[in-house]
Image: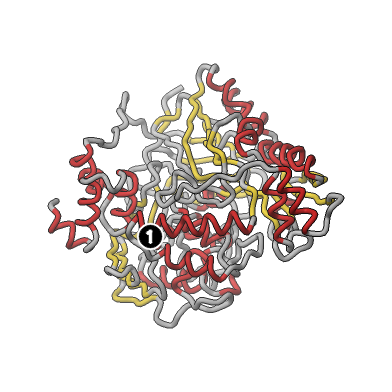
Amino acid sequence: MNKSDLGKVHAALPRLVEDLEHGRLKRRAFLRTATLLGLSAPVAYAVAGTITGEYPVSRAQAQEPRHGGILRTSMNIKDCSDPAIYDWSEKGNVARQVIEPLVMLGPDNIARPWLAERWEASEDLKTWTFYLRQGVKWNNGDDFIADDVIANFTRWLDPATGSSNYGRFAALRGPDDGDPMLDNAIEKVDEHTIRFNLRTADLALPENMTDYPALIVHRRFVEEGGNFVENPVGTGPFLLQEFAIGQRAVFTKRDAAEYWGPEIYLDGLEFLDHGDDPAASLAALASGQVDLLYRLFSIDQVPAIRQRGGIRLYEVATAQTGVARMKVTEPPFDNEMVRQAVAACIDHEVLLDLAYQNFGLPGENHHVSPVHPEYAEIPRPQQDYDRARQLLAEAGYPDGIDVSIDCVAQPTWESNTCQIIAEMVRPAGINLSVNIMPGGTYWDRWLTAPFGFTSWTHRPLGVTVLNLGYRTGVPWNESSYSNPEFDRLLDQANGTLDVDARREIMAQLEAIMQGDAVIVQPFWRAIHTASSDRVQGFEIQPAEEHHYHGVWLQEG
């Protein structure tokens, strides 16, 4: 495809190619930006390969895939009633076997069309036209049409729903907290074409559609009960047959003639809940009770698995992390100097070493990862006890302060991190008690706790994370942070196509977050999982989404 042809897809693509040719743009940034602008992933890889000489490595099939078998995966089973308000990746992994997204994020962190066959963006990134895949059937026999997509977005952008998509798709609603979706935000062009009219430009619109709360339910979801488990209507490759919270979810393969997508080799799936003890799920894998783990919950298990026969270890660098976030509306964290004092006590490299065995990268207290294409390298926070003590004294605590932090018991890296933070802040006079609680208890209060440690999954763009967690008034803004200048710059970053220009804006956003001391972010995590050698074709995905297209089981 020559540059003039690329220009027909989007006017900015020829310039991106020139930037790649002259070394002004890295291959990874080219691939992500080109695919977001509507270029298919295979073509984007081919164009980049022609210029750089780097091509994706094809997975060699040592054997012909085998049809049949039930893949058994160890994973916690949580309430999956309403996909719009999902707040755990595990919920998404249950539902995505039945319902699907408009856009899918691959193991390579690149967005690909799924229920949307392709899309086009205007030059100013404010008008996006999505062409839906035709011939897709819901498992109740209905056609998948534009009305399904419109119904989902309308519900997501109703503040009363409480969906995190209210922050993801903020450009489709008014600018203020509580504003509804704009009247002209979504146009139905025809039965399989939708046009999005954004208030502000947003390059990340397609990638925002990949996240687990953006799985598409049937247009009559609410009127038919509003409960996915009780009425599991979907376009996906499997049918939900059995579901019990804390126990299991069982699926059978849909008739191949009814499913639009790639070939499915498995006859069915079982997700089995082995509780919060990391040893229990690993024992289930070692004994053959399951074939695959959703994740390795304890980093301490990695060395042992590497030495064990019959088990395959998977690892990927990600933008997954945890944040010790301080609620800026609650004393004493409503005092910026107290927050800054806590942050000044932290040695991120030591935290990474002690809490996560150096499987990752040190954090920088701004929630934008080096794996994000717009990440800007700014000065890293340094441990400074003298500054911490001075800040505490100026805040009115010359003799120190007693505070507590809430965290979950499992996975153990989270509570271990909090214990190490408690030791780090002690020399400055901050007496931090660590309140370790069951996961269910913590997640009932994660949005209200004055000081809490929350794990965050991978998102492919830094702006996506900031929109979800730190924009004024969005549902997942657990710190209650509100900074008009931050919001303004975030809007600007969302609509900036040039990677270098977006990086300059991101540097300002990162510096604001560091200065306002909203979070202590210890490190970025490499993640791991494991399977039996029988499992073939599985690839670990940075957001821990489990996609089973192309997965099969060897006879054993």
- Looking at the image, which residue is at 55% across and 34% down? 293
How far from the left and from the top, in percent, is residue 384?
A: 68, 43
Quadrant position of residue 50: top left
- Looking at the image, which residue is at 42% across and 38% down? 266
Quadrant position of residue 495: bottom left
Report if residue 444 is visible in the image: no
The residue positioned farthest toward the bottom in the image shown: 183
Q: Nearer the viewer, residue 113 or 499?
A: 499
Q: Nearer the viewer, residue 164 or 336?
A: 336
Relative to residue 4, is residue 435 drawn left or right? right
The residue positioned farthest toward the right in the image shown: 399
Report if residue 446 is visible in the image: yes
Q: Is residue 161 above or below residue 521?
A: below
Quadrant position of residue 303: top right
- Please rate how many residues cluster around mark 1, counting C-alpha atoms within 10 Å: few if below 14, some from 14 to 19, many from 20: many
Q: Is residue 153 above or below residue 502?
A: below
Relative to residue 162, is residue 50 drawn left or right? left
Disc 1, SS: helix
- Looking at the image, which residue is at 21% across and 46% down? 21
Relative to residue 535, is residue 49 drawn left or right? left
Q: Nearer the viewer, residue 297 or 21?
A: 21
How far from the left and from the top, in percent, is residue 276?
A: 69, 39
How far from the left and from the top, in percent, is residue 526?
A: 52, 36
Relative to residue 23, is residue 466 drawn left or right? right
Three-letter amino acid code of the residue under disc 1? Pro
Q: Is residue 87 above or below residue 553?
A: below
